[in-house]
Amino acid sequence: MIYYKPVLSSLRIEDIERFIGITSYVTGHEGIGGVIKMRSEDFLVWEVLETGLDAKKLFESSSFVGDFGNYILCVLKKVGVDSIRAVSLLASRLSIRSKEIGICGIKDKMSVSWQFITIPSSITEKILEDGKTISVGNLIEVKPIRWFQHRLSSRLLRNNVFRVRIRNPKTTDVQKVEEIIKELRGKGVPNYFGHQRFGITRPITPVVGRLILKRRLGEAVAAFLSDYSNLENEKNRLVRKELGEGWDLGRAIEIFPKSLVYERRMIESLIKNPGDYVKCLRTLPLRLRRLIVESVGARIFNLALSEIIEEDRLNEIEVGDIVLPVDSSGRADKNRPITVTSRNIKQVEKLVKDEKMVNALPILGYLSPIPRSSKGEIILEIMEKEEIDLKDFMIVDMPEASTKGSLRPVIITKWSCSVLSVDDESFTLEFSLPPGSYATILLREIMKSENPLSYIGRHS
């Protein structure tokens, strides 16, 4: 029996955003309310590469071209499943490892998504047979596009395009939406990590991540399996609660729903290897293990950004800040940080105003630079309160999940947003964001919903 006291069991709807560190709005206009993602087709998202290749257009109209390469570039269309799970399903279908499939980024579960992937050319026959798409149930389809020389990574992604339907808004006055968009253009869209980075109904990743950082692996496993939220699916909540109260793994493997794929793998591992919590955690895909660890830094980033916004300093540049160059697509170059000094501050301020540079905060890791400014002091104060040290991110028990940290812009640069259509019951918006930015954060400023569950299609 692992002793673990649930953290999420008392979580209320009104606590969700504060729990993940999002406490502020940039805009002062009243939001339009409404609900997104009531249906998967209400939330469309697709990738555009640096070369201009558009995933949605290619999936709908292209045929395979090219001569030869080390990889095959494909478009993965998925409905109602997250990217990590989709890649895992595809890897199983092709009899390869998930890490052999290259992706640019992770797309929402409750959506229809078109994203690029690369697959090793060694399995050409399975991919190119009859030129047809590969399907896995009704969840994913994969269409081969062309030969490709390199494994796909986020560096090749230019932007994500979204087409989102907001149902049941409080108003269908287009002018109100346009006023908010205009205000955002003047003040900037805060670059929070979005709700889905942590989970809205059960934001467990920073809880598990913190336990891993503190080498409390048994508790980390218990948290992942048994910590329950009253906002999640009732069946899932009840089986988690029962496991936490009695820690009967044999009973758990019988009652845990098959939809809880990761949990069932972990339980099976514990039954076969009692007390081996490292092996248990390693049943999770490597991408997910890293996301769990990195979610601790993501939450601290959000908390710091919220405090900066509350102090009305989102666009302030001060000596000691760290800024990043921004390319024409709005992507910040995290490998070329520049520290603001008394000598360059005027030049930096001009470049930031021209969207050629952007202020940044660290996503914590063992090599994270902390700004030598008041913004850095905010980060350090939060770290002290959360009892987190940079060295914690060097994970001795699972080195592969360690993170050296990175830098993240405090605002979203080079974005666009417009009202595509409106009727008596909904708005449809189309907008474009650079890689790593969250659609729900832009929508949050427009909707200002009192109930964060409205961002996952739920009224209550």
Image (cartoon, rainbow, N blue to C red):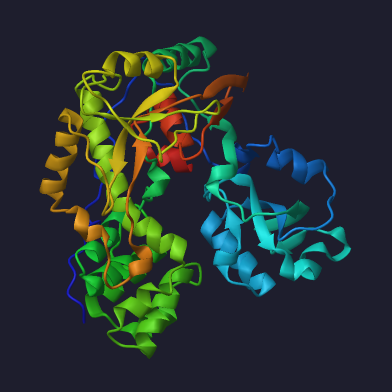
Q: Give the residue at x 11% y 47%.
A: 384
Q: Quadrant of the C terminus?
A: top left
**Residue 31 in view, yes or no:** yes
**Residue 423 in view, yes or no:** no
Q: Tell whether 44 sits left or right of 17.
A: right
Q: Tell whether 30 sits left or right of 155.
A: left
Q: Give the residue at x 79% y 43%.
A: 60
Number of numbered labels in the structure image: 0
User: Quadrant location of residue 325?
Assistant: top left
Foreground pick, 241 / 213: 213
Q: Give the residue at x 48% y 42%.
A: 457
User: Quadrant location of residue 207?
Assistant: bottom left
Q: Is residue 316 above or below residue 323?
A: above
Where is residue 182? Give x, y as percent. Answer: 45, 12
Q: Give the residue at x 54% y 46%.
A: 154
Q: Is residue 343 above or below residue 290?
A: above
Q: Tell whether 153 sits left or right of 453.
A: right
Foreground pick, 417 / 395: 395
User: Quadrant location of residue 286?
Assistant: bottom left
Q: Tell whether 175 sits left or right of 370.
A: right
Residue reaching furthest to the front: 343
Q: Is residue 451 above or below residue 122?
A: above
Q: Quadrant of the N terminus?
A: bottom left
Where is residue 197? Give x, y as percent. Answer: 40, 48
Where is residue 231? Give x, y as percent. Answer: 34, 52
Q: Is residue 207 above or below residue 409?
A: below
Where is residue 111? Give x, y as percent. Answer: 58, 45
Foreground pick, 171 / 412: 412
